[in-house]
Amino acid sequence: MRLQIENLSFSYGSIDAVEDICLKVKKGEFIGLIGPNGSGKSTVLKNLYRALKPDKGSVMLDNENLFAMSHKEAALKLGVVGQENEVPFEFKVEEIVAMGRSPHKKLFDIDTAEDKRIVHHALEHLGMENMAKRSYQNLSGGEKQRVIIARVIAQETDFLILDEPTNHLDISYQLQIFDFVKRLGVTVLSAIHDLNMAALYCDRIYVLKNGKIVLSGTPEEVLTPENIYSVYGVRCDVTIHPITGKVAITFLPAGMGI
Ligand SMILES: Nc1ncnc2c1ncn2[C@@H]1O[C@H](COP(=O)(O)OP(=O)(O)OP(=O)(O)O)[C@@H](O)[C@H]1O
């Protein structure tokens, strides 16, 4: 087991954001975390990448207590794309991506030819090589998102935690990012809003509602019209797509419901 979360709970002051979360991720799995706005997806992920500390529960990464690891040890194992990616100073795109190499280095180590090759390779994969010298702050939301994904690729971890990684991206980059991450063959835990994307890419899905996991299973098991209605209050039609062989959801506007 790569990741095992047991009974994790977290409150923001008096707001109980997530409660008794139990979740497992096996090696090589692509796991989706879905649920309505405010259901607690980011809070769970922030507790994993240690932006927050759980009030209760345990998190084991490769059978080690995640919270007993140094930040560097954790960063060598876990790559993170969070939701807030603002950078306070003026950095070039290639400098941001090079930050992904820092867990592999000691303080004051300079970038080696190998680091530069990895950074270039990551930018190339995201179609950003011609933007390497641009200032990060002047990029569009989608371009920034691709730089942050290039940075996590340059970090070369085999476990990615992604919080809405395709937020801001047009459909071509959404598919490109998920295809790319899938091809990497790494273990992934990702919050995903788009249920059709979750159906296309996830091996298993956990569903959060009001801070609790209410369902889990394969996309076929979880993404049924009944479940989607009970979690989101939205009517839909679900079929198995003839080309992808995956669940395809058509949402039904008010008045067109069954
Ligand atoms: N910094 C904070 N202070 C207080 N409450 C917070 C804070 N961040 C989140 N919350 C609350 O915790 C709950 C869970 O929020 P969270 O951001 O984890 O949900 P989410 O499922 O990721 O939502 P979204 O889909 O909108 O990104 C919500 O009720 C939210 O209002």
Image (tube, helix red, strand yellow):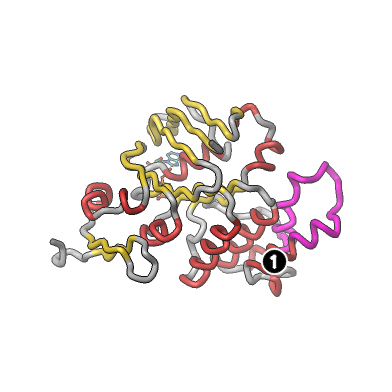
In the image, what residue occupies the spot 64% across and 63% down? Answer: 137
Residue sticking out furthest to the bottom: 130
Q: Is residue 105 magenta?
A: yes
Percent position (x, y) of residue 225?
A: 23, 55
In the image, what residue occupies the spot 70% across and 36% down? Answer: 73
Q: Considering the image in quadrants, where does the C terminus appear? A: bottom left
Asked if disc 1 is less than 8 Å from ligand 1, the answer is no
Figure check: 230 above or below 66: below
Figure check: 80 above or below 3: below
Q: Quadrant of residue 180?
A: bottom right
Figure check: 227 above or below 176: above
Percent position (x, y) of residue 119?
A: 74, 61
Q: Nearer the viewer, residue 97 or 214?
A: 214
| Amino acid marked by disc 1 | Ser
Residue that numbered label 1 is attached to: 135
Percent position (x, y) of residue 8?
A: 45, 30
**Left or right relative to 179: residue 120:** right
Percent position (x, y) of residue 99?
A: 72, 52
**Left or right relative to 245: residue 186:** right
**Left or right relative to 51: residue 97:** right
In the image, what residue occupies the spot 36% across and 62% down? Answer: 246
**Left or right relative to 52: residue 228:** left
In the image, what residue occupies the spot 55% across and 48% down? Answer: 28
Q: Nearer the viewer, residue 64 or 91?
A: 64
- Read off the magenta span: 90-118
Q: Is residue 5 magenta?
A: no
- Magenta span: chief secondary structure: helix
Residue sticking out furthest to the top: 56
Question: How many marks on residues?
Answer: 1
Secondary structure of the residue carrying tag 1 is: loop
